[in-house]
Image (cartoon, grey):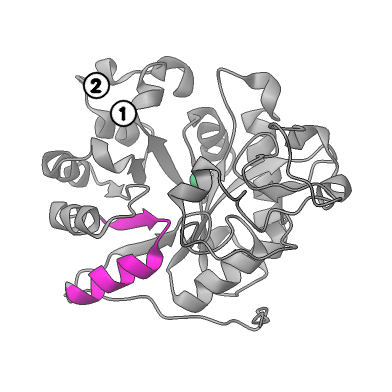
Amino acid sequence: MTRYIQLQGHRGARGLFPENTIEGFIRTLALGVDVLEMDVGLTADGQVVVTHDPSLNPDITRAAGGEWLARPGPMIGSLTREALLAYDVGRIRPGSAYADSFPDQAPHDGARIPVLAEVIGLDPEIRFDIELKTFPLHPEWTASPGEMADAVLATLDATGAVPRATVQSFDWRGLRHLRARRPDVTLSWLTRRSTGVDTRRWWDGPDPSDYAGSVPRAVAAEGGPIWAPEHHDLTAELVDEAHLLGLEVVPWTVNRPDDMRRLIGFGVDGLISDRPDLVRCVLDAEGLTVPLARSGPGIIRAG
Ligand code: MG
């Protein structure tokens, strides 16, 4: 049996196209991934929008007059969907550290923050990995985890996309809420060392020390089925332990070919990457299945 490694495009393909935008997702589908990874928040009028930060990010956001935001904000949750449409998120601010991190990102001026249903409508078969962005240490920044999870579920139900979706979060409260309400929704438990500092709050109770220091055991105790660790936290032994517990292991955010090869060697089940083009090259070179390029009926290729 040929081994299969799922390729997830992080925020679409942040290294190549404007993150979390329709234009970026369309180009990512045309490039060929298995899964579109994205982040969500709730607007003041309860719309699920696809964006990473709890407030508008000055590194990628211009106001209606074309001027760059001087500082973070306003908060996504303070703006209606209509108000949010005034902002252009199609280009990284030239000269910023963020631009240095993604020098190959091609801009698409005019790109707006989309609603989740628009992204789901792009392709009838592609899978989605939807990250609930809530913050246990800052409840004032966003809707509650339960509210956000319910709003995402409503969109997934309305679009018939539950079978094609995974919901992930560092804040395990939203995931537990979904599991209790709808066990048919696939969940992915995000972890990283920085949240390990305050794990009892991010995990709302448990801590690795409750599992002899084992993060995969903590994820298995939640029912899995997917563990999504920061890739530097992974070892071959941890991947083996997770597999013995029945978990799939899908690390983030893997952008360098040497890291991709190392993690494939560990036996991971998927890779989340800002550079799915590079992952495709590595998969091909390793003799592994490379995802098909897609252009579904909902997709209009921009020139
Ligand atoms: Mg994310």
Task: Indicate whether residue 135 is drawn in magenta.
Answer: no
Task: Indicate whether residue 277 is drawn in magenta.
Answer: yes
- Dot 2 falls on a residue whose secondary structure is helix
**Along the line of sight, the residue nearer the viewer: 30 or 242:** 30
- Residues under labels 1 and 2: Cα distance? 6 Å
Is disc 1 in contact with disc 2, using a CB cutoff of under 8 Å? yes
- Which of the 4 quarters of the picture holds residue 180? top right
Q: Earlier in the sequence, mark 1 or mark 2?
A: 2
Q: Could one spot residue 167 in this view of the protein?
A: no
Local crowd size for mark 1, using a 10 Å CA cut-off: few (<14), some (14–19), many (≥20): many
What amino acid is labelled 1 in the image? Ala
Residue located beneath label 2 in the image: 211
Residue located beneath label 1 in the image: 218
263 in relation to 284, above or below: above
Q: Position of residue 46 (x, y in %)?
A: 80, 41
What amino acid is labelled 2 in the image? Tyr
Instruction: Specify the farthest residue to the front.
Output: 95
The N terminus is located in which quarter? Answer: bottom left
Q: Could one spot residue 23 in this view of the protein?
A: yes
Q: Position of residue 143 (x, y in %)?
A: 71, 30
What residue is drawn where x is 56% and y is 33%?
Answer: 174
Local crowd size for mark 2, using a 10 Å CA cut-off: few (<14), some (14–19), many (≥20): some
- Residue span colored magenta: 269-285
**Along the line of sight, the residue nearer the viewer: 60 or 170:** 60
In this image, 76 relative to 50: left or right? right
Q: Position of residue 121 (x, y in %)?
A: 68, 69
The C terminus is located in which quarter? Answer: bottom right
